[in-house]
Amino acid sequence: MPVPADLVFAAANAETLREIGSWDGFRPATFAASEFPVDAVRFERSPSPPVVLSRARRAETLKALPAGLRERAVSAFARVERQPTFLGLPEGRRLDLSMGPIVMGVVNVTPDSFSDGGLYFDPRRAALRALEMFEEGAEIVDVGGESTRPSTYGDAAPVSAAEEIRRVLPVIEAIRRETGRPVSIDTRKEEVARAALAAGADLVNDVSALRHDPRMASTVAEAGAALLLMHMKGDDPRTMQADTSYGHPVADVASELAAAASKALDAGVPADRIAVDPGLGFGKSAEGNLVLLRHVGALRSLGFPVAVGASRKGFVRRFSGVGEDASPAERLPGSLAAVAAARAGGAAIVRVHDVPETVRFLRMHEAIDHVALGRSEGAALR
Ligand code: HH2
């Protein structure tokens, strides 16, 4: 079952429409201000410009389109509206995604990860941190044994599958002895995924989106596990920042994720066990990361839950005005702003290092969004 990468971009103002239009030479000047907000449906690998529909007049404009385009536009809109409310896990368990983004806590069992390298290299400390993250409100913990930091942080040493397994397996086993809560393995290597799944991992977070090892998809399918497909430009974290050019970051990333999802489906991973991630910082320019964050909503039109990982990354440091030598904690305000953007775009999962702060931040957003007017509870609070 192929996944078409027809994307729906919601353009709430003239500037967004102009930006989307500029990718294909579309001329938004022909639209009156009264037509906002509009939806632009961009068809991947199609020579035709994006189809732009005023939301107020969507039905009549759709009718006027040629039949082929109309069908694709209608199914693209249907996909955006029918968003997955859960991610399937082994043994019939699920991650509930219906209440806004859930938090995926990061535990790197590495000596050299860019933000927490060395902190959890000891398996007991790593497992304790994972359990603590569940207490703090994480719904899933992502355990990784290889740093994929770009060379701007100094080259990460290559890690063999055997060494990666030696690092992560005791951690997953220790977590499993204490809890059945969902655990994810962050790896590109099929051997590592296989060992982690056998030890009880529920989800494979493949930062190469199946390009590093094509056997990965069938291994995940056999285990009945979930698969998170993350976009990376190129296959090697050490060289991924060498060329960060795109036709347009959102359209290109979406079409590559759609291709990866098709491979996963072909290998037997059910659609309700697939999630996608734009891979912020993985072969993207600093501005490219911002554009992807602003258009998370468009990635949702692929029909899979979208995960976003901006936590503490270099572009967050840079745009939030934090010095290079500042501690990782100083990247928190910028990271939370990225969480807010991901949430606004409808992201289902946010991958973060600062779990309690992010959980509280999201709770506050929920409270603001869902306040029942006219009902005050108990004493006045200030
Ligand atoms: N980012 C990192 C690693 N894995 N997986 C997904 N799905 N999305 C991401 O954005 C992502 C990821 C990089 O962060 P970290 O694991 O903290 O660093 P390192 O690769 O240096 O271990």
Image: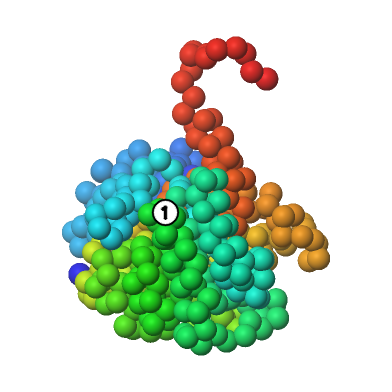
Residue 20: where, in percent of width, then height? Answer: 48, 59
Going by the image, does 94 lie left or right of 155?
A: left
The number of discs equals 1
Residue beneath the point at 55% across and 51% down: 132
- Badge 1 crowding class, 10 Å Cα cut-off, few under 14, some 14 to 19, many 20 or more, is few
Q: Quick check: 173 above or below 213? A: above
Picture coordinates of residue 264 (x, y %)?
A: 29, 72
Residue 223 falls in image quadrant? bottom left
Q: Position of residue 28 (x, y in %)?
A: 47, 54
Q: Reply above or below: 281 against 338.
A: below
Q: Residue at x 77, y 60 (%)?
A: 327
Q: Identify the image quadrant of the N terminus.
A: bottom left
| Picture coordinates of residue 373, whole percent (x, y) | 48, 17
The residue at 48%/71% (across/down) is 170
Above or below, 19 relative to 246: above
Looking at the image, which residue sits at the far front? 177
Question: Which quadrant, please, contains the C terminus?
Answer: top right
Q: Which residue is mark 1?
A: 179
Residue 154 sits above or below residue 178 on the image: below
Question: For residue 196, which quarter of the picture?
Answer: bottom left
Taking 199 as reference, is 69 left or right? left
Instruction: Tell me if residue 319 can be seen.
Output: no
Report the residue at 38% width, 54% height from top.
Answer: 180
